[in-house]
Amino acid sequence: MASETGRFVISFNGEIFNHVELRRDLKAQGHRFRTTTDTEVILCLFERIGERCLSLLNGDFAFAIWDTLRERMFIARDRMGVRPLFYTRHRGAVYFASEAKALLKVPGIEARLDIKALDQILTVWAPIAPRTAFQDIFELEPATYAFIDRNGLVMTPYWKHEFPDYGDHAGSAAEEKLDDLLTDAVRLRLRADVEVGCYLSGGLDSSVVAAVAAGLGAQPLRTFAIAFESKEHDESYFQNIMAVHLGTRHVQMRMTSADIATNFPDVVRHMERPVIRSAPAPLYTLARLVRGSGIKAVLTGEGADEIFAGYDIFKEAKVRRFCTRQPGSRFRPLLFRRLYPYLPNLSRQTPEYLSAFFMAGSAELGDPLFSHRPRFRSTSATKMFFSRDVKSALAGYDAAEEIVSLLPADFRRWHPLNQAQYLETRFLLPGYILSSQGDRMAMAHGIEGRFPFLDHRLVEFAARLHPEQKLKGLDEKHVLRGVADKLLPSEISGRRKQPYRAPDVEAFVGETKRAFVEAAMGAESIERLAIFDPVTVEKLHRKCAMGAPSGFRDNAAFVAILSTQLWQETFSAGSAARAVA
């Protein structure tokens, strides 16, 4: 679309949820509109105030605007990184797209695996932007814009996720403010030319979103959920409670391990990167079901765990800090058991084992990565399977230390909980949750995910809360639960956080094994692609095939190796020797 004067031309992916209000204000200033689209609102704002327009936009977006007069390109991405924007530079030109694979059409751009990006995935679970899995293809970072002209590309952040001094919202006042902000965030995201549905996981976050949406809608809300064949992963009981409570038109998809295996090659192709978990696969299949039901946009609960401290990693860090300060406390094993009640094996372990297990690899209290260091070290165990050449190419590189170098100047002044939240929101949320599990899986079927909890007003509100309003003792999302108590059945509002998990190794071995798994993990393929060591991979494969993976590390290693092999076969279709060089 071109502006009214013809000077500016825009290419836009996403939604501006407050475009109605912005349009009203612009009309009051005398601007005339030719359409009712949010695209024209962006153009009008940019023509009037340039890059400052970004501060007015409430939405999920990635767009490029060409200035025909100055022959200059402007590109920008939303604050939280919901919508992707990839770019590459070749022979003096800059190309951009919503998918990295589209840039492989540029003459001279080849699909070569970026080894440092793989190292980052096997540390942080995702590449650290601007890196992607592809050499020479980059991702514009969230909350960033850039001007591109003959002199090059200059990037500038326009918003920062910071934790300022605590606000004055306490007790019921905080709950009322949260209720108001969340209701408005959902209201804006229900705006659409078509019906908007809602994912319903059975947990607190999606249930709250569904409850608010059901209260705002004029017709019964349509909800969608995954029911796992595996009882360990299934939450259909709680999903059904919420569906009945809200009177939604509920659709539940039965997911088996065989389904995960069958869809995994397509999942890797759409993710455009290796992963360490199979969790994106069920969401890929769910999005296909949603599209088949005639829905093109869904609300989800993503973001609440990051901004209100819902993940176990926040509680684990708090317990580890206590244990570091009180090494002789008899409460140590009790606290660890309370952290993970859904892991039955912990109840049978001795206090000595529990303390040794959870404190292994623990960091110094002053370490800026204290909260995440054990996770990074555990995930990094997969690197032992790298080939000799890859290990040599990565000698001296440390993805965790790269993260340290990217932390804001005020980071060390923040409360430890806020530090942990920043790490999760800055690195894992856009790189994995919103990408591999989010936009990539939904948009594979033309489904637009909408995330009320990631409305920037909510994110900023949560950042000003006192840590105890988010994590009170070991009770997560304290202030959000206060809101949930008024909206949800007690079975849901009082339920502890259950992480979203899907079968990993078990989906690819035994009765569900597939020929592509045997081929990708086989010695011939491992040797040809040269990323991993065939001897150690063969041992892992045999161990897992016998049904004996030893917890997270083996599961993560198996999925990481398999997805990396599939990525290579899908995109580069040849030797990885060039990727190592």
Image (spheres, rainbow, N blue to C red):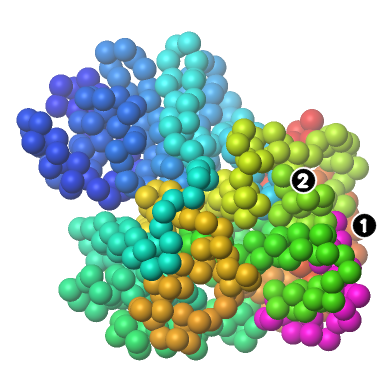
Label 1: which secondary element: helix
Residue beneath label 2, please? Answer: 366
| Image: magenta residue range | 340-361
Secondary structure mainly formed by the magenta segment: helix
Q: Position of residue 131 (x, y in %)?
A: 62, 37
Q: CA distance from mark 2 to mark 1?
A: 39 Å
Q: Position of residue 551 (x, y in %)?
A: 79, 71
**On screen, 73 above or below 290?**
above
State the residue in front, 420 or 455.
Answer: 420
**On screen, 252 above or below 150?**
below
Residue at horizontal 24%, vertical 66%?
195
State the residue in front, 335 or 191.
Answer: 335
**On screen, 379 above or below 134?**
below
Query: As shown in the figure, which amino acid type bears the numbered disc 1?
Result: Val
The C terminus lies in quadrant: top right
Pointer 2: residues within 10 angstroms few (<14), some, or many (20+)?
few
Residue beneath label 1, please? Answer: 535
